[in-house]
Amino acid sequence: MTTETRQAAYRLGHMAEWRAVWRLRLAGYSILARRYKTKLGEIDIVARRGGVLAFVEVKARTRIITAADALGSRQFGRVARAASLFVARHPHYAAHSIRFDAVLVGSLWPRHLPDVWRPPE
């Protein structure tokens, strides 16, 4: 991957996250963190609405269907591990329901998919 390709992908991802944040805000979510990095993984967006704490993976592709195909359980596993650290570091959210969502960006209006993945029990 060339430097130019990597920079273009970074810009696309940054713009997609910005659009996802606004999509969530318009749906009544408070954004608690963006690009939350831990040694176990990264969470694109941490959002809260009422008693629900949502850990959101953002996928941007030219088409929504391609973005949906890019979601994988391996990614959500990393998000789940990072989410456990987020809750440990912010214990006042421990009583909230935890959910793993996705926002797909591929058209004008991002699509929010609530509760797309659950960790194995």
Image (cartoon, rainbow, N blue to C red):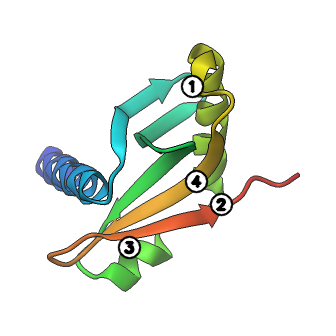
- Nearer mark to the viewer, of 4 and 2: 4
Q: Which mark is residue 73?
A: 2
Residue 67 disc label = 3
Q: Give the x, y percent position of residue 104.
A: 35, 69
Q: Residue at x 45, y 53 (%)?
A: 57
User: In the displayed image of the protein, which residue is found farthest to the right?
Assistant: 121
**Which of the two residues, 43 or 4, is positioned nearer the viewer here?**
43
Name the spot of residue 58 as percent of width and height, x first.
37, 56
Give the CA distance from mark 3 to mark 4: 16 Å
Residue 98 percent location from the top left of the image? 64, 45
Looking at the rendered structure, the secondary structure element under dot 2 is helix
Q: In terms of depth relative to the viewer, which is nearer, 10 or 95?
A: 95
Residue 106 is left or right of residue 114, and the answer is left
Q: Kindly identify which residue carries mark 4.
A: 100
Q: Earlier in the sequence, mark 4 or mark 1?
A: 1
Q: Secondary structure at mark 4?
A: strand
Looking at the image, which residue is at 59% across and 32% down? 82
Q: Amino acid at mark 2?
A: Ser
The spot of residue 91 in percent (x, y) is: 63, 17
Q: Crowding at label 4, few (<14), some or many (≥20) Cα neighbours within 10 Å? A: many
Q: As shown in the figure, which amino acid type bears the numbered disc 3?
A: Ala
Q: Earlier in the sequence, mark 3 or mark 2?
A: 3
Q: Give the vertical position of 92 relative to 78 (above or below).
A: above
Please tell me whether mark 1 or mark 3 is closer to you in this view.
1
Q: Is residue 63 above or below residue 44?
A: below
Count neighbours of disc 3 (C-alpha within 10 A) and say few if under 14, some if 14 to 19, many if 20 or more.
some
Q: Name the front one of labels 1 and 2.
A: 1
**Foreground disc of the pair 3, 4:** 4
* Numbered tag placed on residue 86 in the rendering: 1
